[in-house]
Amino acid sequence: MAANATSFTSPLADFSVGSLPPQVDYLVNTIANASFMTWVFTLLALAVAYDQISYFVQKGSIVGPAFKLPFMGPFLESLNPKFEEYKAKWNSGPLSCVSVFHKFVVIASTRDLSRKVFNSPTYVKPCVVDIATKILGEDSWVFLDGKAHVDYRKGLNGLFTRRALECYLPGQEAVYKQYFARFLRLTKEAGGKPIPFMHEFRELMCTVSLRTFAGYYMPDSACKKIADDYYLVTAALDLVNFPIIIPYTRTWYGKQAARMVMDELAKCAAKSKVRMAAGGEITCIMDAWIKDMIASKKWTEAVEKGLSTEGMVKPSPLLRDFSDMEIARTLFTFLFASQDATSSAATNMFQVLANRPDVLDRVREENYRVRNGDIHAPVNLEQLESMTYTRAVVRELLRWRPPVIMVPYKAKKPFPVTENYTVPKGAMIIPTTYMALRDPEVYENPDEFDPERYYTGDAEEKGAKNYLVFGTGPHYCLGQHYAQLNLALMIGKASVELDWKHHATPDSDEIKVFATIFPKVCCGMAECFDVFEAN
Ligand code: HEM
């Protein structure tokens, strides 16, 4: 045994076969005499080489870094994503790629490639972001595929019909009234000093969502706790996370917060079941869903017992009974889908209208008119829909600052996305929305916020294929009509009841990515406003 050998020396050390050619004999001897550390370094080198080669093979002809930082790739940068870096990536080519840990990610940046991904359910399925499956559960309905997804979704469509949306309006008006009074009080208490409002807008949108989803079954204290803690779920939503959840890390806190929200929603479902069984009126999405379940059960029982169904309306589709926790998990997916997107829209909306008094004045004028001059008058759905200018402002805001800039999907099998490139099975493929919404051939001066495009202009028709704000294909946003009407209600009501001043900083017009997009300084919580009563 060699003099410097350690106790880890390979058992092959004394192996020798005299008849082997000298080169092979040399190789066998080298392997046999290798120390433990040599083995470790050799295996490491092989693993690095495998990681690089597999990256090259997956990358194929598309744009991407020439080399990957061994194993983790640009993981550290992905913890603090910069909007400018995303933009550079989108501009680098119609398809580009990056590899982080085990995850190979392909980014589609043109309108047509994005649409192709959204509309290829045979090849792809949504994966939101890596951590989402752990937070929502692998078996969450949003990850269902094909017929199972279509069937589940059909059972939810009834919750977003015009008739249903009308029932939720009073609850939403009540939340805006409560929070606008709070905004005025906060400004007054600050004694004229501008105060940060991003958290306020997030809390407002969270409360309005919770009241729309679970009504007043949820106590104020639970609403407040969820509005505060939901931030932890957002903070956990990096594009790619460390593969396992380690206690006391961001992902762990996110998962704990999600569990707490689902428990609260399950308690609400139990209360709603009792009230709906007693014939109560629908006040929220939970009520509407449970009422459909009760009607389905009645119908099925009548048919099974051979009773007359005369005078009954057959629910379509017929729903099974869902447990309290199943209801909670589904409504949590609504909150998950809506909270960051609507908070982003609300923050950008208040900011841009403070900076564009010409637009705010027109919104205000339209809302006064529809409310017959009574600023506290509630509006019904028809009145809301009649406000074409206010709705054009919402439409343009979502084009100009699309809250969801990327929608991660996963390739279920090799996906020939172009003639020259096939996305490997298991890779993430991300259609982006931003570039389609900034296409200069469709939107003149695309960086300018100009609601006129949707009021007197032809952006709606011309940009019909470009408006990817809510996705497209089988997973397009279930809440898109609700979201737009609700934003119109919010800004319309704010325009007649409030006035507000934005204290801009040099970074206010820059974009910060925090799951969705916010004004840059916002994430330092410093986007400041004063809120006054409108006069
Ligand atoms: C401005 C606000 C919103 C924006 C920008 C937005 C955007 C999106 C986008 C881009 C998708 C992915 C679509 C796709 O993969 O094709 C999506 C899906 C979804 N959204 Fe929204 N959303 C908003 C508000 C809401 C609200 C308020 C709700 C709930 C009430 C909601 C519920 C959903 C659900 C459930 C899905 C998944 C649908 C499925 O997988 O079948 N969203 N949304």
Image (tube, grey):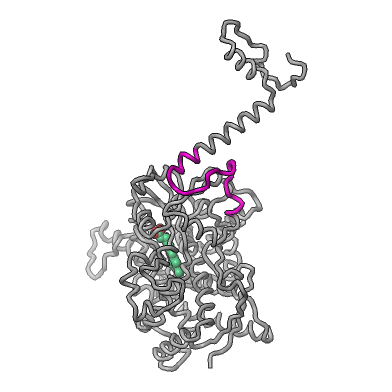
Please give the name of the residue rendered at 45% of the width and 57% of the height, measured from the top-left corner.
407
State whether residue 361 is above or below residue 37: below
Residue 361 painted magenta: no
State whether residue 518 is above or below residue 171: above
Please give the name of the residue rendered at 65% of the width and 79% of the height, measured from the top-left corner.
195
Q: Is residue 140 visible?
A: no
Stretch in magenta: 54-78
Q: Is residue 369 left or right of residue 218?
A: left
Q: Quadrant of residue 23?
A: top right
Q: Is residue 190 visible?
A: yes
Q: Position of residue 68 (x, y in %)?
A: 56, 43
State whether residue 459 is above or below residue 355: above
Foreground of the two, 290 or 377: 377
Please give the name of the residue rendered at 42% of the width and 67% of the height, measured from the top-left corner.
438
Q: Position of residue 495 (x, y in %)?
A: 49, 85
The overriding secondary structure of the stretch rendered in magenta is loop
Image quadrant occupied by the N terminus: top right
Q: Is residue 146 left or right of residue 400?
A: left
Residue 63 painted magenta: yes
Quarter of the rendered image showing ligand 1: bottom left
Q: Position of residue 193 (x, y in %)?
A: 68, 83
Q: Quadrant of residue 159?
A: bottom left
Q: Position of residue 50 (x, y in %)?
A: 53, 34
Please give the name of the residue rendered at 60% of the width and 85% of the height, measured from the top-left corner.
184
Q: Is residue 505 left or right of residue 330?
A: right
